[in-house]
Amino acid sequence: MSAAHVDAVDGTDVRTAHQDLHSDRGALRGEHPGRSRNPVVKVADLAWLEFEKPDLDRAEVFARDFGFGVAARTERELWLRGTFAGTPCMVIRKGRTSRFIGPAFRAAERADLDRLARATGSAVRDLRAVRDARDARDADVPGGGKVVDLLDPSGFPVRVVHCGEQLPALPEQRPLLLNSGTDHRRRNLAQRPPREPSRIQRLGHLVLETRVFARALDWYLDTLGMIVSDFLFLDGQRDRGPTMAFVRCDQGSLAVDHHTLAMHLGPGNGYVHSAYQVTDLDSIAAGGEYLDERGYKRSWGIGRHIQGSQLFDYWRDPDRFMLEHFADGDLFSRDLDPGWAPMSTSGLAQWGPPATRDFLGASPSPARVRDVFRALRGDNEMDPARLLGLLKAANS
Ligand SMILES: [Fe+2]
C-alpha cells in the first residue's frame, strides 16, 4: 500500500512528508496491522458527543463563546452545532454532575445498524423514541433516526446512529485571503479579521484515556471498522505493543480526518479532549483572543501538531473539560499504512509553546492518584513499567 507520491505544479514527482514521517517508520514484522480484516461495519464519522451538566445556561454561554451554534434548546437538553450541514456536534443533557457520557458515530448506511445489532446482540431503536422515554418534551430536538447502543471495553456507552434529519448549512466564517510571497490574492483591500468567537464548522475528533488500550483499540477496529493512522509506543517498550493510536474512519478512496478518535493507555478511563474545526489560523487566533478576554483558561496553544498536522489551540470550559479549536488537518484515504513513533511530549507539536502541565495532566489531583493505585491493582494493561514509561514520555 501507500505510494504517496504527488505531482508538483511543475509536473515532477515529489515525495510527501507523510512518506518520510510514516511509511519509512512503519510497523516492524509481526506488529499490529492497524486495521481489522473483516470488521462488522465501517462507520462514516463521529456524529456527536454526549455530556451531562447541571447548569445548561452556563454551558450555553461557554458554547456560544467557543463558537458553537445552538441547534435546539429545551429545559433538559442543549444541542450544539457547527456551520456545516449534517448532525449536531454535541448534546448536553441536564444532570446532577458534569460528566462525559460517550460518543455517537454516524453509520454509513441504515443497513449497518442491523448488521451491528445482529453481531453484538443489541437492538436497533428509534432515536426519537429513546429520547421520548427520557423526557417527552424533548421530542423536537434535531437528529431523529435510528440508533444501536453499545458499550466499548473501557465502559463508554457508544452509539451508532443513522439520522433522518440533516441540519442545513449555516453562513460560514470566510477564510482570509492571504498574500504570500509573490502570490498576491488580496489587492486594494485591508486585512481586518473581526474580534469575534471562532465559528465551529464541525466536530473533528475525540480523545479518550483507557486502562485497557489494546482491547479497546481492537474493539473499534473490529466493530466499527476504523483504521489506525499513527501508533505511539513507550520508549524502550515497543515490543509490548503501542500505547496510543490515532484512528480514522475507513471511507475507501475518500480522504478523511487523520484521526476521528485517539486513545491512549493511562491509569483512568475518561475523556481527554474533543476537537472542533474552524476555518483557518486567524479564526483560531482571533477566537482565542475572544475567549481570553472573557476569562476562559487556555490549556495549550497555538501550535501545529505532528500526528495529524493540525493547527491547534486547547481551552478549558467552566467545568474543566478540554476542547480544541483546529484547522488545516491531514486527510488520509485508506491507502496509507500506520506510522510508528515513540511517545513524547516534544513529539506532540512541530511548533508552538511547550506543552503545559495543564494539558499533560501533570498536576495530579487526589482522584488521579486514586486512579493510579486502582489501575496498578486491577485487571488491566497498566503495570509499574508502563506507568514509569508514561511518566518518562510526559517529561521527554
Ligand atoms: Fe486533538
Image (spheres, rainbow, N blue to C red):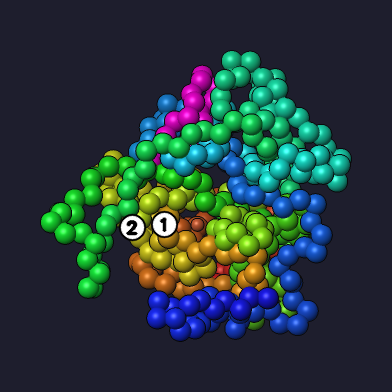
- Whichever of callouts 1 and 2 sits on the residue coming sooner in the sequence is 2
Question: What is the x, y in percent for residue 309?
Answer: 46, 66
User: Which residue is situated farthest in the top direction here?
Assistant: 137
Q: Are marks 1 and 2 in contact (CB under 8 Å)?
A: yes
Q: Main secondary structure of the magenta part?
A: strand
Tell me: residue 222, above or below residue 126.
below
Residue at image location 51% in from the left, 46% down from the top: 203
Residue 122 occupies quadrant: top right
Could you tell me the amino acid type at mark 2? Leu
**Disc 2: CA contacts within 10 A as few (<14), some (14-19) or many (>=20):** many
| Horizontal arrangement in the rendering, residue 294 relative to residue 396 (left or right) | left
Q: Nearer the viewer, residue 180 or 352?
A: 180
Question: What is the x, y in percent for residue 243?
Answer: 66, 67
Could you tell me the amino acid type at mark 1? Ala
Q: Is there any visible trace of residue 308 in the rendered image?
A: yes
Residue 237 occupies quadrant: bottom right
Q: The magenta stretch spans which residues?
A: 67-81
User: Which residue is situated farthest in the left direction here?
Assistant: 188
Residue at image location 40% in from the left, 81% down from the top: 10
Which element carries disc 1, helix, strand or loop?
Answer: strand
Residue at image location 49% in from the left, 73% down from the top: 347
Which residue is the site of mark 2? 281
Residue at image location 56% in from the left, 69% down from the top: 391
Tell me: residue 163, above or below residue 203.
above
Q: Is residue 79 magenta?
A: yes
Tell me: residue 160, above or below residue 394.
above
Which element carries disc 2, helix, strand or loop?
Answer: helix
